[in-house]
Image: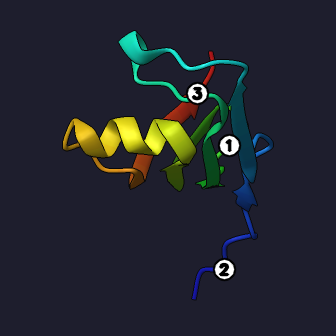
Amino acid sequence: MVLFPPRHFVSERAPRAEITLYGKDDVDNGLGSGLSDAALGLRLRYEFSRQFAPYVGVEWTSKFGGTADFARAADEPDADTLWVVGLKFWL
């Protein structure tokens, strides 16, 4: 039987939360005034060594107010779930 030490880590930049606010409407870019959008994400990595660590993550995004109205008018979703897979390494 081979035992591995625990090397699962929630990434140092996660959980991540972000909100975006705008002072006025920007019709050309599809942005409404006030609370425009928000994102929440989480990444989990496994460190084989300090130099090599693959990770997986998920991020949820949502648009609000006028920005959501612009997105719906353009037949775009006002909420989305993104999956992330990557590799952290250094030499």
- Of the pair 56 and 91, the residue shown nearer to us: 56
Cβ atoms under marks 3 and 1 closer than 8 Å? no
Check disc 1 and report the residue beneath it. 49
Crowd class of label 1 (few under 14; some 14 to 19; many from 20; radius 10 Å): few
Report, in whole angstroms, how far the alpha carbon at label 2 lies from the one at label 3. Answer: 24 Å
Residue 77 percent coordinates (x, y): 30, 50
**Number of numbered tags placed on the structure image:** 3
Residue 12 percent coordinates (x, y): 80, 43
Name the residue: 73% across, 19% down: 23
Q: Mark 2 or mark 3: which is in front?
A: 3
Q: Quadrant of the C terminus?
A: top right
Point out the tag, 2 or 1, that comes first from the N-terminus. Answer: 2
Secondary structure category for the residue under label 2 = loop
Check disc 3 and report the residue beneath it. 89
- Of the pair 83 and 69, the residue shown nearer to us: 69
Secondary structure category for the residue under label 1 = loop
Name the residue: 44% across, 44% down: 68
Residue 14 against residue 58 in the figure, above or below? above
Going by the image, does 77 lie left or right of 58? left
Residue farthest to the bottom?
1
Name the residue: 75% across, 70% down: 6
Q: Mark 2 or mark 1: which is in front?
A: 1
The amino acid sitting under disc 3 is Phe
Going by the image, does 69 lie left or right of 72? right
Name the residue: 61% across, 47% down: 39
Secondary structure category for the residue under label 3 = strand
Check disc 2 and report the residue beneath it. 3
Q: Mark 3 or mark 1: which is in front?
A: 3
Crowd class of label 3 (few under 14; some 14 to 19; many from 20; radius 10 Å): few
Q: Quadrant of the N terminus?
A: bottom right
Residue 70 percent coordinates (x, y): 36, 35
